[in-house]
C-alpha cells in the first residue's frame, strides 16, 4: 500500500468520524443543549442579571438591641445612603431571618445592646451584618454601606476626642494622608465588568466537556467506532477518532467562542479591549486543550450523566481557582497545583488580562504556553484512554461472539441428537 493510499484512508476515516459526531451533536438532545443552546442562551441571562453593575435602595431590616442615640444615628446614615433602604425593624434575629426567607428584605443589621456603652468607654463596638448571598450585587451594597457608615462615625468620634481647635486639625487627625480611591480596570466598580469575562471563558470549557462526555457516553453504549479499523491498527485508528471528534467540536465552538467573547460583551456594553489577533492566538490553544481534556474526562466516566454531575459540581471552585474572584496570592499552593490541571485556569487569566486590563499577547505568553502544553498532554492522554477502551470493547465483543458461537454449536448438536433418536 502506497503512502498516498494510507493518507487517503486516514482522511476518509477521520472524515467519517467527523460526520458521525456532527450528526450526534444535532440528534442527541443533551449534546445539543450543552453544546449550542446553553452557550447561546446562558451568557445572555447571566450578563442581563448583572448588567446594572450596581444596585440601589436594597431593602434591609434592623435589629436594634441598643436603642441608643448612636445606634439610631447609624441607622439614619445607612438609610440616607443611595444603596440601602431601611424598610423595617425587628424584635430579634429570628424575626429578621423570617423576612429574609420570605425575600421581603435582602439583609440584616444587628446592633448589639452594648453598642453605645462600648463606644462611650472608648472600646471597639461590633455591628453584625447578615446578607442574602444569592445575588452578589445586593451583598456588596449592604456590606459596603455598613463599612462606609462605620468609618464615617468613627471619624466623627475621633474628632470629638482629639481636642483639636480647627477644621484643618480635624482633617489631619481623621485623614493624615489624603488619597483618591480609583478602581483599577473597573471604573464603574460593578460586578459585570469584574467577573463576567472570566465566567464566559469558564462556560466554554464546562459546556464543551459536558457535550463531549454525553456524546462519548452514547457512542460507548452503542459501540460506535469500534469496527472502523482492524485490531492490529488500533492506535492508528485512535488518532483518526481523536482528530475527527476534535474537528467537529472545534468547528462548533469556534462559533460559540466568537459569540461569547466578542458579541455578548458588546451587547451589554462590558469592557472589551482585546484585539482579534490576540483573541485568536488565545482561543486556538484554549479550545484544543478543552476538547482533549473533555475527551480524557469522558473516557473516565462510565455513565454519561456522571459527567454532568462532576462538571457542574466543580464549576464554582474552578472560578475561584482562576484567581479572578479570589486573589491568586491567597490560594494555597496545593490548590494552585490542582488548578493547573484545568485549561480554564490559564484561559481565564489570559483573557481577563487582555480583555479587561488592556494587556497584549506578550503579557500572557506564559499562560498561552501552558495551554499548548495542556493541549499536547491531554491529546496524549485521550489517545491512551481511547486505545485502551477500544481494546476492551473489542475483547468484550469477541467474548460475546465466542459465547454465541458455542450456543449455536450446542443447539446444532442437540438438533442432531434429536434427529438421530
Image (tube, helix red, strand yellow):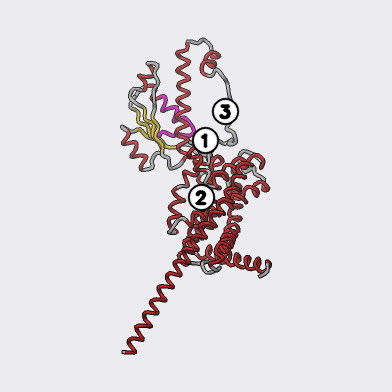
Q: Is residue 101 left or right of residue 338?
A: left
Q: Quarter holding the N terminus?
A: bottom right
**205 w.r.t. 247: above or below:** above
Q: Which residue is mark 1?
A: 327
For the residue labelled by badge 3, is the local secondary structure a helix, a strand or a loop? Answer: loop
Q: Which residue is mark 2?
A: 45
User: Distance between the Cα atoms at labels 3 and 2?
Assistant: 32 Å
Q: Earlier in the sequence, mark 3 or mark 1?
A: 3
Residue 240 lies in the magenta stretch: no
Q: Nearer the viewer, residue 376 or 413?
A: 413
Q: Is residue 80 left or right of residue 22?
A: left
On the image, the x and y values in percent for residue 62 come to 37, 32
Which residues lie in the magenta part? Answer: 73-86
Residue that appears at 59% across and 33% down: 184
Q: How many marks?
A: 3
On the image, the x and y values in percent for residue 297 come to 49, 54
Residue that appears at 45% across and 69% down: 397
On the image, the x and y values in percent for residue 235 come to 56, 61
User: Distance between the Cα atoms at labels 3 and 1?
Assistant: 19 Å
The nearer-to-camera label among 3 and 1 is: 1
**236 w.r.t. 150: above or below:** below
Residue that appears at 42% across and 71% down: 400
Q: Quarter holding the C terminus?
A: bottom left
Q: Which residue is mark 3?
A: 181
On the image, the x and y values in percent for residue 116 come to 37, 20
Amino acid at each position: 500500500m502506497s503512502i498516498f493510499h494510507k493518507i487517503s484512508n486516514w482522511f476518509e476515516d477521520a472524515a467519517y468520524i467527523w460526520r458521525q459526531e456532527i450528526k450526534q451533536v444535532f440528534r442527541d438532545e443533551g449534546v445539543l443543549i450543552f453544546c449550542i443552546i446553553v452557550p447561546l442562551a446562558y451568557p445572555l441571562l447571566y450578563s442581563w442579571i448583572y448588567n446594572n453593575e450596581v444596585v440601589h435602595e436594597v431593602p434591609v431590616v434592623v435589629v436594634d438591641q441598643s436603642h441608643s442615640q448612636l445606634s439610631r444615628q447609624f441607622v439614619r446614615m445607612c438609610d440616607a445612603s443611595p444603596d440601602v433602604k431601611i424598610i423595617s425593624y425587628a424584635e430579634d434575629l429570628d424575626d429578621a431571618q423570617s423576612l429574609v426567607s420570605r425575600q421581603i428584605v435582602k439583609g440584616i443589621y444587628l446592633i448589639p445592646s452594648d453598642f453605645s456603652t462600648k463606644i462611650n468607654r472608648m472600646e471597639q463596638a461590633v455591628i453584625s451584618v447578615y446578607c442574602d448571598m444569592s445575588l452578589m450585587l445586593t451583598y456588596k451594597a449592604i456590606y459596603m454601606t455598613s463599612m462606609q457608615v462605620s468609618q464615617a462615625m468613627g471619624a466623627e468620634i475621633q474628632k470629638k476626642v482629639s481636642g483639636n481647635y480647627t477644621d484643618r486639625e480635624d482633617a489631619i487627625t481623621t485623614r493624615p494622608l489624603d488619597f483618591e480611591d480609583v478602581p483599577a480596570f473597573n471604573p464603574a466598580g460593578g460586578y459585570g465588568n469584574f467577573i463576567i469575562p472570566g465566567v464566559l471563558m469558564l462556560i466554554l470549557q464546562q459546556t464543551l466537556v459536558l457535550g463531549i462526555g454525553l456524546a462519548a457516553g452514547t457512542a460507548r453504549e452503542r459501540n460506535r467506532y469500534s469496527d472502523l479499523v482492524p485490531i492490529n491498527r488500533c492506535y492508528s485508528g485512535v488518532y483518526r477518532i481523536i482528530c475527527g471528534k476534535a474537528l467537529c467540536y472545534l468547528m462548533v465552538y469556534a462559533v460559540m467562542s466568537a459569540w461569547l467573547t466578542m458579541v455578548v460583551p458588546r451587547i451589554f456594553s462590558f469592557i472589551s479591549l482585546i484585539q482579534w489577533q490576540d483573541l485568536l492566538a488565545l482561543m486556538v490553544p484554549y479550545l484544543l486543550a478543552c476538547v482533549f481534556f473533555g475527551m480524557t474526562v469522558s473516557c473516565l466516566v462510565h455513565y454519561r450523566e456522571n459527567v454532568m454531575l462532576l462538571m457542574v459540581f466543580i464549576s464554582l471552585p474552578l472560578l475561584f481557582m482562576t484567581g479572578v474572584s479570589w486573589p491568586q496570592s491567597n490560594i494555597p499552593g496545593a490548590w494552585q497545583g490542582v488548578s493547573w490541571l484545568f485549561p480554564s485556569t490559564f484561559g481565564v487569566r489570559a483573557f481577563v488580562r487582555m480583555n479587561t486590563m488592556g494587556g497584549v499577547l506578550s503579557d500572557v505568553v506564559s499562560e498561552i504556553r501552558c495551554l499548548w502544553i495542556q493541549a499536547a498532554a491531554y491529546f496524549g492522554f485521550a489517545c491512551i484512554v481511547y486505545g485502551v477502551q477500544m481494546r476492551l470493547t473489542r475483547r468484550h465483543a469477541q467474548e460475546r461472539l465466542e459465547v454465541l458461537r458455542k450456543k449455536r454449536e450446542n443447539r446444532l448438536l442437540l438438533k442432531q441428537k434429536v434427529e438421530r433418536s
